[in-house]
Image: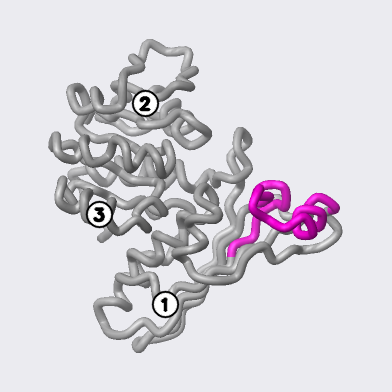
Amino acid sequence: MKVGILGWGAIGSWVGEKLYNGSIPGVTLEAVASRNYRLPAPVKCIEPLELSQCVDVVIETAGHEAVNDYVPGLLEKGIRVVLVSTGALRDQGLYDELAKAGGDRLILSTGAIGGVDIVRACRQAGNIESITLSTTKPSLALERPWMSAEMIAQIREGREVVECYRGSALAATELFPESVNVAATLAFAAGSWEPVDVRIFADPLATLNSHKIDIVSDIGLYKVEVSNHPLPSNPKSSALVGASLLRSLHDLTTNLPTFM
């Protein structure tokens, strides 16, 4: 299976180097589409839509704007796309366009969290009353230009845990687009944005990116907690995201029984 990578930031380059070094038998890194391509290896760098001419699967790690600009065209060409930037789908128009272009070829990565299987099962079994996502990251990874001067000062002082956000998953994906794609992932697993509430904390002592998920449903109460090492090249991203992408590629190629 020939793989292309759209985007060559912290996640894309981590996955790309693993693939180039043969981490998954039968899977090769064929091409990269990025302005920031730096891999010292003979893998061609091409325009995003040209990926459809030489690969079977595209890994998207380029962000929300790239999803809007390129993913519909790739799907229309019959290419499978594994999406990291799930928060881009908060745009209902884009979501509808992707579904029309080839929704059955669009794979949403589970990214930095676990428990997506539980949420999907609860959705099938009955009502999901609520999902609360509490995300904690190192303080400086969460500073944003739109924050008040007081909040920015608290984050920079690093004396205490600062609650940066409390509210809907839909708004969270807009305010923290590179940090809480997990909120969108939970919403799509639940089939609605409505039950998902998000809390985001900046912790000056945190060295890991943590996500606590509390699920209340007709069939039970569930708690899922993950604490991820951040990628050295970008503390906003978790190493588990890259590992989840490798797992997706493995599942697409294996002839052995797999989980679903």
Secondary structure beneath label 3? loop
Q: In the rendering, at what x and y percent does residue 126 appear? A: 28, 85
In the rendered image, residue 260 lying in the magenta stretch gets the answer no
Instruction: Tell me which label, 2 or 1, sits earlier in the chain.
Output: 2
The residue pinned by badge 3 equals: 258
Magenta residues, as a range? 135-157
Q: Are marks 1 and 3 in contact (CB under 8 Å)?
A: no
For the C terminus, which image quadrant? bottom left
The residue pinned by badge 1 equals: 195
Q: In this rendering, which labeled residue sits more in front, label 1 or label 3?
A: 1
The residue pinned by badge 2 equals: 22
What is the distance, in whole Å, between disc 2 and disc 3 at their CAs? 21 Å
The residue at the point 55 percent across, 66 percent down is 225
The residue nearer to you, when weighing 82 against 172, is 172
Is 8 drawn above or below residue 86 in the view shown? Answer: above
Q: In the rendering, at what x and y percent does residue 110 appear? A: 39, 55
Q: In the rendering, at what x and y percent does residue 34 appear? A: 41, 24
Is 259 drawn above or below residue 19 in the view shown? Answer: below
Q: Amino acid at mark 2?
A: Gly
Secondary structure beneath label 1? loop
Secondary structure beneath label 2? loop
Q: Which corner quadrant of the image does residue 116 belong to?
A: bottom left
In the rendered image, residue 136 lying in the magenta stretch gets the answer yes
What is the distance, in whole Å, between disc 1 and disc 3 at their CAs? 30 Å
On the rendered structure, is 21 left or right of 147?
A: left
Instruction: Tell me which label, 1 or 3, sits earlier in the chain.
Output: 1
The residue at the point 70 percent across, 52 percent down is 138
Q: Are marks 2 and 1 in contact (CB under 8 Å)?
A: no
Q: Amino acid at mark 1?
A: Pro
- Say if residue 223 shows up in the picture: no
Q: What is the crowding at mark 1: few (fewer than 14 residues within 10 Å), some, or many (at least 20)?
A: some
What is the distance, in whole Å, between disc 2 and disc 1 at their CAs? 41 Å
